[in-house]
Image (cartoon, coloured by chain):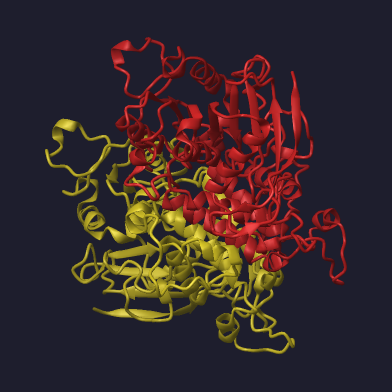
Chain colours: A red, B yellow
């Protein structure tokens, strides 16, 4: 398989906020051969990277090969057939220009970096694809906030997309998620090491030092705040059921050390639980790979996204799109609910675009789109090949009679969390 | 109505952890006249106080009169009829000995205070009632972790309770709640002003100063960490539906200031949302009234509580109880779910104690037990008067035929969050 990875300098870039930077570099990877009409743009999630399928760069830590079960030769998004492109979004920290990048004055932008929106991501991807010689996309695919990115594509460039595949996403976050994201940002900005966003490579003596040592000793970068933000995110990505199965109330193994955070003497009377140990471990890994300012910027972009903004409603926002749309949602996902996906499906139905809302029965929570490839793969593969008529693609509007007896997905149901 | 409030010194107290302190003072309030068999013990929730009904002390801030809609003359827990006692739990900060209290050496205990368990709360209440001349209780009533406290009563002193009324509670927290509580504690202990728990009345110069000025200038007490912990708790107490209704995605009013926490310049491009403003306001109020170390201690007690500990299962734990039990749960509550309450009900059913599980249809989340008195009051009143046969008391096991046509509560249903 032909793969390519690199960074393209798009030159001066006007952000939606009205601020221009002189040079926006976009890091991307591509897999497969471009034949003119087989390009699939994959949009990554909040802390994801361009390294969707595990080739090319290996600098992305946990964000490496994040959808390797779905994208690759012979897989659901078959790189033998499609030319798959994934780009790191502006404001992130995997090679595309963001707060940690060097600004025009030679210092890191820090919080002088312009505010970023999902629209900025989409526009940067359009410019990148121009550079790569890609006009119309066979498909744009994204999960979570990457699904918002994909929705933004069909609103902004309706003629450029044949198939929209939006996974575990919504037209906008609900206030519960807005609240949790806000708390996560406060955890970062109240960490004294955040220092107003100015923590890059500056030691106590005010001299330059390499960021990695700051990061590893935990003394200079806002690791505690970023770790807390990540732990909150992690709880949002799981479900009660998956946490019960993974951890229960079990104490952590004997080797687990309660040393990620300061604690008080009374704590030692109580077990260090498996769930705490897991979150602590994941957070420690995360702070090694992600930039705290990027976390602020990208969550703000996600919180701000609203498909209907500037339109009458969601249906109006996607009215110009004439392709086909598949919405994939997961019953155990309380971050982006099946109800939100069904609401999106209704909007597409109003426009008479062929649309299907395929509900996957899963108690894995929001993470399901990453960890249940055997359920995600078939509808993805068949949709990319045949649109909503694809064999494994189901829809919430299907007549019960027309369903096979052994269908393994649940109908949309109202939940504790529905509005 | 006769009311009484005060502090009783119970003398030396052995905590379940094995540590003894020389003097445990318990702050309590009582309402109504004790006639020998009419005592009702009310157990407060995590950050509640003894001031259940708004008489007596007025030092409890938001914790003042926390169940005033339910407890009082002519109300569901009628103080003309019952002698209602509520006591602040050990480890809290409303007058009962806790981390902020002066220890034997004249300094605040801080984190030298022994770890506290729900069992310690129950035992301190038993001793207090002895002092007040109360033997057997007509009822023990509690909501949230106060409901765990009430469950602990019938496990520990089964002969001392006629009616158990456990509201919006569970036999134990699930791992999702354990995770969120752990994150909340980490927010406190990573606040540099927490200082290992030693932040009471010590100024920068190391001289004594009054705690209130520290608290109000926010410079010396771990206000940021405690505020974050409270905000997380607040999200747990609400539901998606109630947050949607209360806040939606609206921007806060023009007078709202984004000044509770440090922020970065890019934030000003995005709205300061109503939901953020609300959480910030609530958190500011909370840090004025609550002690950060108490928050650590009391959440640990809640996390640790497990009704079945030392027993075969929940049914075995309550097997010696021969009174009647009412479990009240709320459909929109994802902190303590209807499923958890139903599981408790099943355990009581195994013991052949008369039990009812009354499910209240509400989208107010966990807060429902505080903010829906018109739904909570009738079953509470009738249960205290007539047990599970009380007119307004319904049960999940009732035959559908026997229900009135206009019943306004939902059957137990499985949800996104069920196991």
Q: Position of residue A135 (x, y in %)?
A: 57, 29
Q: Residue B51: give x, y in percent of width and height.
A: 38, 73
Quarter of the image where one finds residue A195: bottom right
Q: Nearer the viewer, residue B139 or B198?
A: B198
Look at 74% across and 59% down and name the residue there: A103
Looking at the rendered image, the quarter that the N terminus of chain B falls into is bottom left
Q: Given the current orientation, which residue lies at the most extreme left position?
A: B405
Residue B385 versus residue A390 in the image, above or below: below
Quarter of the figure with residue A68: top right
- Residue drawn 26% across the image and 55% down it: B376
Is residue A320 shown above or below A225?
above
Of residue A266 and residue A135, the one placed in the foreground of this image is A135
Q: Please state which of residues B393 and A71 is positioned toward the viewer in this rendering.
A: A71
Q: Is residue B310 visible?
A: no
Residue B279 x %, y %: 46, 64
Residue B18 vs A8, above or below: the answer is below
């Amino acid at each position: 398989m032909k793969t390519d990875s690199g960074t393209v300098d798009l030159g001066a870039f006007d952000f939606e906020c009205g601020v221009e930077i002189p040079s926006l570099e976009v890091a991307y990877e591509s897999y497969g051969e471009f034949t003119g009409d087989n390009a699939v743009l994959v949009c990554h999630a909040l802390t994801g990277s361009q390294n969707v399928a595990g080739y090319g760069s290996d600098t992305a830590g946990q964000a490496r090969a994040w959808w390797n079960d779905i994208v690759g030769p012979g897989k659901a998004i078959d790189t033998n057939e499609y030319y798959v492109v994934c780009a790191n979004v502006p404001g992130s920290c995997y090679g595309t220009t963001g707060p940690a990048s060097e600004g025009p004055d030679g210092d890191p932008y820090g919080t002088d970096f312009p505010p970023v929106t999902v629209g900025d991501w989409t526009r940067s991807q359009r410019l990148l694809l121009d550079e790569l010689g890609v006009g119309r996309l066979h498909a744009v695919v994204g999960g979570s906030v990457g699904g918002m990115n994909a929705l933004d594509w069909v609103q902004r460039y309706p003629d450029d997309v044949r198939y929209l595949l939006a996974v575990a996403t919504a037209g906008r976050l609900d206030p519960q998620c807005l609240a949790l994201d806000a708390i996560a940002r406060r955890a970062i900005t109240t960490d004294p090491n955040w220092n107003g966003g100015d923590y890059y490579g500056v030691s106590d003596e005010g001299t330059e030092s390499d960021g990695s040592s700051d990061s590893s000793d935990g003394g200079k970068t806002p690791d505690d705040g970023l770790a807390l933000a990540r732990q909150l995110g992690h709880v949002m990505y799981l479900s009660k059921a998956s946490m019960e199965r993974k951890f229960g109330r079990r104490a952590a193994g004997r080797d687990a050390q309660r040393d990620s955070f300061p604690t008080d003497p009374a704590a030692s009377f109580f077990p260090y639980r498996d769930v705490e140990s897991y979150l602590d471990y994941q957070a420690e890994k995360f702070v090694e790979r992600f930039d705290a300012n990027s976390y602020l910027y990208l969550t703000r972009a996600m919180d701000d996204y609203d498909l209907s903004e500037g339109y009458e409603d969601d249906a109006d926002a996607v009215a110009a799109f004439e392709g086909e749309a598949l919405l994939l949602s997961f019953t155990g996902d309380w971050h982006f609910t099946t109800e939100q996906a069904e609401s999106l499906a209704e909007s597409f139905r109003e426009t008479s675009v062929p649309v299907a809302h395929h509900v996957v029965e899963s108690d894995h929570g929001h993470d399901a789109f990453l960890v249940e490839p055997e359920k995600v793969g078939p509808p993805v593969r068949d949709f990319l090949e045949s649109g909503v008529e694809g064999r494994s693609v189901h829809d919430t509007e299907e007549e019960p009679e027309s369903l096979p007896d052994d269908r393994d997905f649940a109908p949309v149901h109202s939940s504790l969390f529905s509005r």
